[in-house]
Amino acid sequence: MFNNVDTKAALIKSKHNQFNRLTLIIFNYETMPYLILLLIAVIAVYLVFRKKKGPKPSVDDLKPVDYKTLLATHVNYYQKLDAAGKTRFEQLVNEFLQDIRIEGVGTEVTALDRALIASSAVIPIFGFPDWKYKNLTNVILYPDTFDGEFQFEGEDRNILGMVGSGYMNGQMLLSRGALMAGFSKSAGAGNAAIHEFVHLLDKADGETDGVPEYFMHHEYALPWLKMMHHEMHRIKEGNSDINPYALTSEAEFLAVAAEYFFEKPDQLKHKHPEIYEQLSKAFGQDLAE
């Protein structure tokens, strides 16, 4: 009798264990898709937050930056402003640096780089209250000129800066050499970084065509086009001191003339009074003394 009871108990225990194993198998089979989805979700969250963190900041990023001193030392436009204008310029520089990411390719971005890039952005829009570059997300700084394939080594590197389009939309590429040259005392009437930001202003209405409708009133558009083509003819004939690169297109004429306007306003007003007047109205700034 004792043996029968033990045998029966052992049989019941064996069936119970088999039931538990079967239940575990069914549980694992049914929950496997959910576990996989959960794992994918965890990985996705990790990648998103990892991307948001961005690259490890450089030593320069971690230092407190006195942009006011950099502007006073390197930006002639800022130096000529009154106290209230300087305060507003500093504020706009800080806002730009908060809104727009600046990163280097083959080079480390310095505080001076940031100050000059932000100044190049602020100068053309200083006459516009509350302007934001909605068509720009980041600026990519190259150590030197680059080519059409965005390479900064080798031959045929003649690009100083460009505004991206297509898959590069929302990005601006600049050469550090051109950036520094534009703010040097020997810059003359040229500033490549300001040139590129004027392209962005021109592009704000959807077309980069030399007629920035967002800040050029409609009644001035036709006279501006006529004036532009007249001056382009003079450049072609060798009778103008405006950079011949302006002959490339109407968009390039606007950007080149804007460089002249912001870098040498007195000279532009003296040699090209009508162009100066049109640009003064368009940018909302009267810079000539």
Image (cartoon, grey):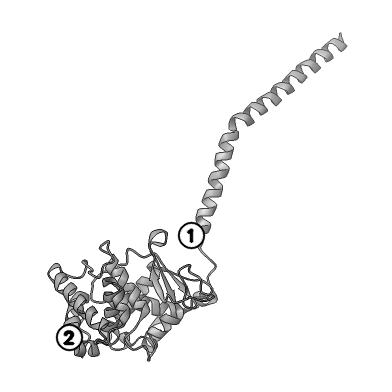
Q: Amino acid at mark 2?
A: Pro
Q: Are there few (<14), some (14-19), or many (20+) residues within 10 Å of tag 2?
A: few
Quadrant including the N terminus? top right
Quadrant including the C terminus? bottom left
Name the residue rendered at 37%, 74% in the picture: 94
How far across and how far down the image is residue 83, in percent?
Answer: 27, 86
Camera-side residue of 23 and 207: 207
Q: Quadrant of residue 140?
A: bottom left
Q: Quadrant of residue 192?
A: bottom left
Kindly check if marks 1 and 2 are in contact, taking CB atoms under 8 A apart as contact: no
Question: How many labels were placed on the picture?
Answer: 2
Q: Are there few (<14), some (14-19), or many (20+) residues within 10 Å of tag 1?
A: few
Q: In the image as oriented, which residue stretches furthest toward the top?
A: 1
Please tell me whether mark 2 sits on a helix, a strand or a loop: helix
In this view of the protein, can residue 65 be seen by the observer? no
Residue 52 shows which numbered tag? 1
How far across and how far down the image is residue 216, in percent?
Answer: 19, 70
Camera-side residue of 128 and 146: 146
Residue 128 shows which numbered tag? none
Q: From this view, report whether residue 156 is shown above or below residue 32.
A: below
- Circle 2 residue: 273
Please tell me whether mark 1 sits on a helix, a strand or a loop: helix
How far across and how far down the image is residue 215, in percent?
Answer: 21, 70
Name the residue rendered at 71%, 26% in the picture: 21
Q: Amino acid at mark 1?
A: Lys
Mark nearest the camera among 1 and 2 is 2
